[in-house]
Image (cartoon, grey):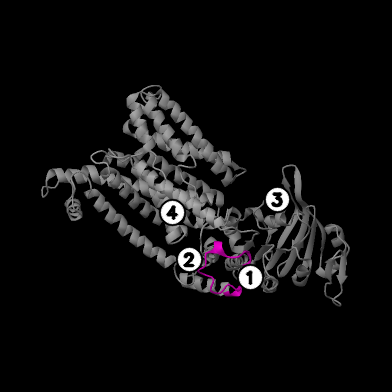
Amino acid sequence: MLELDAVEVLAGERRILGPVSFGLPAGGLVAIVGPNGAGKSTLLKVLAGETPPMGGEVRFQGEDMAAFSASRLARRRAVLSQSLEVAFPFTVFEVVSLGFDGAPRALTAGQKAARIEAMLERVDLAGFGSRNVQTLSGGERQRAHLARVLCQIGEAVDEEGPKLLLLDEPVSSLDIRHQVDTLRMARDFAREGGLVVVVLHDLNLAASFADRMILMRNGRIAEDCDPAALLNGQTVDEVFAIAMTRIDRGPGRPPVVMPHAV
Amino acid sequence: MLRGAANGDRAAAERMTLAVLAGLLLLVAVVAIGVGPSGLSPDRVVALLAAGPGTDRFPVSESIIVWQIRLPRVLMGAIIGAALAVAGATLQGLFRNPLADPGLVGVSPGAALAAVAVIVLGNGILAPLVQPLGIFALPIAAFVGALLSTFLLYTIATRGGRTSVATLLLAGIALGAFSGAITGFFLFLSDDDQLRDITFWTLGGLGGTTWLKLFACGPIMLAAVLASPVLARGLNALTLGESEAFHLGLEVQRMKTLAIVLVAGAVGASVAAAGIIGFVGIIVPHLLRLAVGADHRFLLPGSALLGAALLVLADALARTVAAPAELPIGIITAAIGAPFFLWLLLRRRGLLGV
């Protein structure tokens, strides 16, 4: 569904990504992990069609991603970014409804309102619709934006094929229960046939939900395998430059990793 | 908690507000046409307007006062107020900053500089350009000045097809100061008559508005105001940031270019018609955001209506508080606007806790 072929991104003289090549089939949840500055967010921006690669090519459903218009992309993929500030006092309802605004669909105002309210309930923000989004806590705001992104993307698969959901540290402000809720929603989207790429810091959380994990280091891919293999291998310790203790959880399940020093 | 329906959808309240504002504008306009040295009651104004120009059912003097003097002036005030408020709302949306104003980011000073250049050099080295244009020379110069300064600003702040809003804002302040310096230099060169004309530009005023002037400057402003709703969805998406606007399906760069041309047109034509009138662009969108909602599908038409009503009201005040003399309208808007602006800053400071 998504193929990267020798993709590179430079910032001035410095190479911040690549060259990386891999393919991601639909129907999976892929977690990208790695130390700060490893190029995870840059990779996600490339996958979003936002940062055009300076070398190589990204193919989205067989087509060069650069050929997609903004509005066509918006119907096929949605992005939840890090640290979202809303410049004006919009209500939570209005912010979520922006998801419908970008890529207009044939929905009446009443249908949109019903979907927005249902989505707010799904992210555990029922009754928050009339709150000023600027006064929400960090975690509540993150979930409000998740609701917006889910409204934008809609069904995981439509007549034109599977869709792409990109999440950049979607649980960074969330409590432990909402972390699990959010990743469950992401996994549901993948189970329904869509593709989810999510940047995460928590290796154990990533391993519990991902079908595949990509470990990045200095803009390159250090490891690309299933969660159990990644956490059992030694590359994680090397890339994060800290020795890990592994707690076995039985066959077929990834171990829980903890930094040795703790 | 923000006002509106319980689920947070404020669209119905916003539509209602637009209807109320349209009614308010009509009311203020009728009253303003009646206000002046020879006062007319609102129902007489309505009767005179209904009778049409050149009627013999009313005294000729009253008909002339309404049709030739006050109506073009009130219409000009309304259209300038609408254009400035829409330009302010658009710039604020573009900069994602509620404090942006055409006067603050150097667009109005650029327009005023071009107008002053025409006043001072119109009979000198600019004569071959200025003479053939006649009364259209000033509006055209101000429009070109606004467009040039906006374009320059935009070029400075844009690299690789992306516009940095922070650079745009800072460059605008620098450009405004620079325009001010050159305007000051022209002031130094000018004679007494020119000095009087220039003072008019820097303070702003609607005195001497004629139908001809209205037809010279009005259409550009009207076009900008009527075109503004096209930007509404884009400005809403931009509220989340440029990346997010792109993620939501917006051609961000195209939308920014359109917004900048629209602001230059609205501000340039308004400066040409009445000089620099500050703070309308800040106050009006702010009031509406505070009281009703921030959705640009409401905010842009709402700003047009409230801006029009406020400026017509300010002009009526300008004509009456020091009668028979007339205060420049820029003094009224600045006297009300500047304290309001400070209040906003203090309020924001309180919100940010710094």
Residue at the (46%, 33%) spot, across then down:
B180
Mark 2 neighbour density, 10 Å: few (under 14) some (14–19) many (20 or more): many
From the image, state whether disc 1 or disc 2 is nearer to you. 2
Q: What amino acid is labelled 1 in the image?
A: Val
Circle 3 sits on which residue? Answer: A53
Cα separation, mark 4 vs mark 1, equals: 41 Å
Disc 4 crowd, CA 10 A, few/some/many (<14, 14-19, 20+): many
Q: Earlier in the sequence, mark 2 or mark 4?
A: 2
Question: Which subunit holds the residue at mark 4?
Answer: B
> Are the residues under marks 3 and 2 on the same chain?
no
Q: In the rendering, which numbered label is found on residue B31?
A: none
Q: Position of residue B264 (x, y in %)?
A: 45, 42
Helix, strand or loop under label 3: loop
Q: CA distance from mark 3 to mark 2?
A: 42 Å
Which residue does the numbered mark 2 point to in the structure image? B2
Mark 2 residue type: Leu
- Quickly name the residue at label 4: B285
Mainly helix, strand or loop, the magenta region?
loop
Circle 4 — which element?
helix
Please provide the residue range marked out in magenta.
A121-139
Was residue A133 drawn as part of the magenta stretch in this picture?
yes
Residue A21 image position (x, y, % from top left): 77, 56
* C-alpha separation, residue under disc 2 versus residue under disc 4: 16 Å
